[in-house]
Amino acid sequence: MTEVLTAGRVGVDVYPLQTGVGLEQVTSFGKWVGGSPTNVAVAAARHGRGAAVVTGVGDDPFGRFVHEALRGYGVDTRHVVTIPGRQTPVTFCEIFPPDHFPIYFYGRNPPPDLLIDAFDLAAVRSAGVFWVTVTGLCAEPSRSATLAALEARGKRGITVLDLDYRAQFWASREDARHWVQQALPYVSVAVGNLDECDTAVGVTEPRAAAEALRSHGVKLAVVKQGPKGVLADDGTDTVEVAPVPVTVVNGLGAGDAFGGALCHGLLAGWPLPRLLRFANAAGAIVASRLACSDAMPTSAEVEALLAEVAAEAPPPQAEAAVQTLKADADDDGPAAAGRGRDRHAGGRR
């Protein structure tokens, strides 16, 4: 059974094994499957969920590697199509911890994933979670195929739009905003960082951004604030969770780990505080590792980190780590949390 179906980018991450230096000085690299929605599927599979991804690869060795790697992670590849005459994209990065990770895309001209012109609508309708990205809206025929899939799903189950804005894939921020707002009415959950919220709704203040996303029909808005943690608004409560302190190695896959953990918790029906704590911790684990897909944690690893953080926190901090803020403006409850002890990378892959 497909519990989590994602759609969008795939490629091969070729990441340096030396950190703190530019690519011109790197002497060796590691190779892993990559692409944000593909990583989300891998992350969900790590939590025991039946996961699949809708994407495309080239008829080349890297395309064959993607199939092999995904099967190894337990991700269903039946919706990974091979596009003749195209190359599987390759992504390089530079690693300058704790917060500078330049990324370089090759082979996206256009890539196979943007040439998919139709989804398996039966699979889209039946998935527990259907996860799509804004990048899938940046060009035809992927744009029309993605919007048609969202319309066919009709908000069944949990439908997530990852705001995933990458300026190099768009003519302008305004163009991206137009198409994001065509998709928002079809989704129940929207997830993005502050810059991506700016693209989606023209707002960067976290609570206002969440409210603006919900005004477009979204039931749950999740706003990632980097070192200030994460905020979520479901229309009843606004919950803010502080970051998990880690020593950052590579922040690029942290947001995808957050996404896979979010899917897991949403399917489990967890309350917002637990959901956000778990997803935050999953992202922190990946930020402390080099790779993206290969670094995705199991649920046991996430729970172990949460237990370690809880054991180390003094009682007042433990109580304040998560604060539920009532929507009523007259509520005189505690102020927002979100002041972490160390840097947390909610990086965008």
Image (cartoon, rainbow, N blue to C red):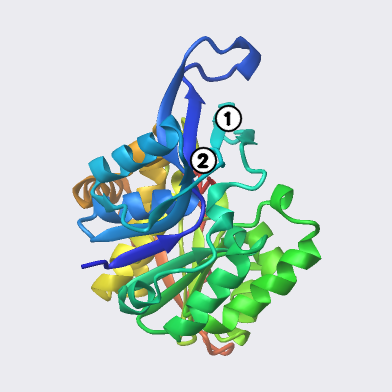
Closer to us: 240 or 291: 291
Closer to us: 103 or 114: 114
- Which three-letter amino acid code belongs to the residue tagged 2? Leu
Which secondary structure lies at badge 2?
Answer: loop
Q: Which residue is mark 1?
A: 93
Name of the residue lying farthest toward the front:
84
Q: Is residue 158 left or right of residue 114?
A: left
Which secondary structure lies at badge 1?
Answer: strand
Q: Is residue 211 left or right of residue 66?
A: right
Q: Residue at x 29, y 59 (%)?
A: 51
Give the image location of residue 213, x and y in percent.
Answer: 61, 78
Give the image location of residue 166, x and y in percent.
Answer: 66, 52
Q: How many neighbours does mark 2 have within 10 angstroms: few (below 14), some (14-19), or many (20 or more)?
A: many
Marker disc for residue 252: 2
Above or below, comparing residue 296 to residue 266 in the picture: above
Closer to us: 31 or 161: 31
- Which three-letter amino acid code belongs to the residue tagged 1? Cys
Q: Are marks 2 and 1 in contact (CB under 8 Å)?
A: yes
Give the image location of residue 314, x and y in percent.
Answer: 32, 50
Q: Residue at x 39, y 53 (%)?
A: 80
Q: Is residue 291 visible?
A: no
